[in-house]
Image (spheres, grey):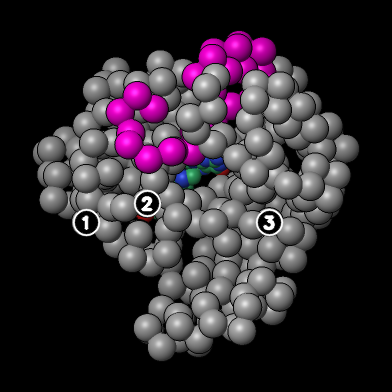
Amino acid sequence: MIVIGERINTSRKPIHEALEKRDKAFLQEEARKQEAAGAAYIDVNCGSRLNTEYDDFLWLVELVQEAVSVPLSLDSPSAKVLEAGLANVDKRPLINSITLEKERFDEVAPILEGNRADIIALCMDDSGIPNATEKIVENAAALVERLEGLGLERSGIFVDPLIQPLSVDTENGNTALKAIERIMTDLAGVHTTCGLSNVSYGLPERFLVNRTFIVCAMASGLDSAIIDPLDKKMMTNILTAEMILGRDEYCSEFIDAMREGRLTP
Ligand code: THG
């Protein structure tokens, strides 16, 4: 699993406060802990900082990459912010994200020219977030075709099916799972990723729902996720499912994680 560590997000109170205080040491520790727990990318999101996002983002990007050796996931709806982030990283980042919405696509596409970043593609268009498998897969195929047209390789495209809450429609889980399976077969070579918080929205015991859903999604082919890598129960489920699904040669990741105390049986 390609784990994208989600903790550096100003919608989280400790991060908001650390940013206000310019507490560099705290923020760098948040980044380091995620890398140590297995994050392949550190997501940086300060979208909640409406008027100061641009400057805050660049400050965060610099301090995070000083702290870790893994690349960043540049997470913003603003093309300007993404472009500035890309100009300031020294390792090939993940741009989070592009969509099929006309304005968003046309703004973000130029940033991808020259193939200097991988990309998360959200399966939505100007008609909104789809709630049928067919439409999710159709958006995914259109995104992949257009991104390949810009010179990107499938291996650099992370398709996010945008999971909808079970509390809104109990079929939303199946819809996303079927979409993941179709995307991973019809568009072989791409990655799939997702944020999990939406699936459990409005339900009690959200963490339980999230960490059970991810196992189902992995069985459908999901090979990346935007999660909190310090959530030991979540990481335990991921590492165990990875092994059960035949994606852990000699079970060595599982055994190493056990020895290093990263599993919570
Ligand atoms: N897809 C893509 N990118 C994304 C998302 C997605 N980026 C943002 C978001 N969704 C993923 N990132 C986070 C970061 C933090 C939290 C959730 C998602 C978070 N959630 C707890 C909550 O919701 O209550 C708060 C816990 C806490 O305060 O510590 O923190 O879907 N491509």
Q: Nearer the viewer, residue 30 or 111?
A: 111
Does dot 3 land on a helix, a strand or a loop? Answer: loop
In percent of width and height, residue 247 lies at 66, 71
Picture layout, residue 128 above or below residue 42: above
Which label belongs to residue 222? 3
In percent of width and height, residue 80 lies at 40, 16
Say which residue appears at 30% left-offset and 28% top-offset: 88
Residue 244 located within the stretch drawn in magenta: no
Q: Quadrant of residue 90?
A: top left
Label 2 to label 3, Cα distance in Å? 21 Å
Residue at the disc numbered 1? 29
**Callout 3 crowding tier (Cα within 10 Å): few <14, some 14–19, many ≥20:** many
Residue at the disc numbered 2? 70
Picture layout, residue 45 above or below residue 115: below
Please report whichever mark, 2 or 3, sits nearer to the chain's N-terminal start: 2
The reply to whether residue 13 is in sight is yes
Q: Quadrant of residue 152?
A: top right
The reply to whether residue 130 is in sight is no
Instruction: Please state which amino acid type lies under the numbered disc 2.
Output: Val
**Segment tinted magenta in the rendering:** 86-112
